[in-house]
Amino acid sequence: MSTDPEELPLTIDLDSLSEEQIRQYTFVDVREDTERLIKPCRELTHEHFPLSRFQPADGFPADPGKQYIFFCAKGQRSLMLAEYLREQGVNNVCSLDGGIDAIKHHFRKS
């Protein structure tokens, strides 16, 4: 699977990626602080950008040289953010299918 932003799907299944491909992406947790305390993500390195702090006028500080995979609890909020940013012309973002549960499941079976 290419990590070319032009070919980046809107949603992505973690199990479809190799470990090498996983390391090429920048994962961004859009959950709130309280959610992160209840179900922390220790399985992979990631940034934190809570959706509640997102301001459309400010956008998302995306580095054009990176590809971002947003995740939340189940994949709905991260998908909303990815769709919105795509509409604004930010094409190097996508949403993780299944959210934090998909991450936990993926690394539990590895």
Image: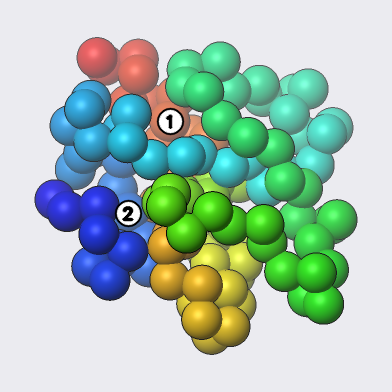
Q: How many marks?
A: 2
Q: Provide the residue designation for mark 1.
A: 103
Residue visible at 35% across and 15% down? 108
Residue visible at 70% across and 37% down? 48
For the C terminus, which image quadrant?
Answer: top left
Under circle 2, the secondary element is strand
Q: Are marks 2 and 1 in contact (CB under 8 Å)?
A: no
Say whether residue 90 is visible.
yes
Indicate whether 30 appears above or below 19. below
Percent from the top left, x then y, of residue 95?
Answer: 46, 57
Amino acid type of the residue that numbered disc 2 sits on in the rendered structure: Ile
Under circle 1, the secondary element is helix
Say whether residue 73 is visible.
no
Indicate whether 98 appears above or below 90. above
Q: CA distance from mark 2 to mark 1?
A: 12 Å
Disc ID at residue 12? 2
Disc 2 crowd, CA 10 A, few/some/many (<14, 14-19, 20+)? some
Residue 102 location, quadrant: top left
Residue 11 location, quadrant: bottom left
Seen as rendered, the residue at the extreme bottom is 87
Residue 91 location, quadrant: bottom left
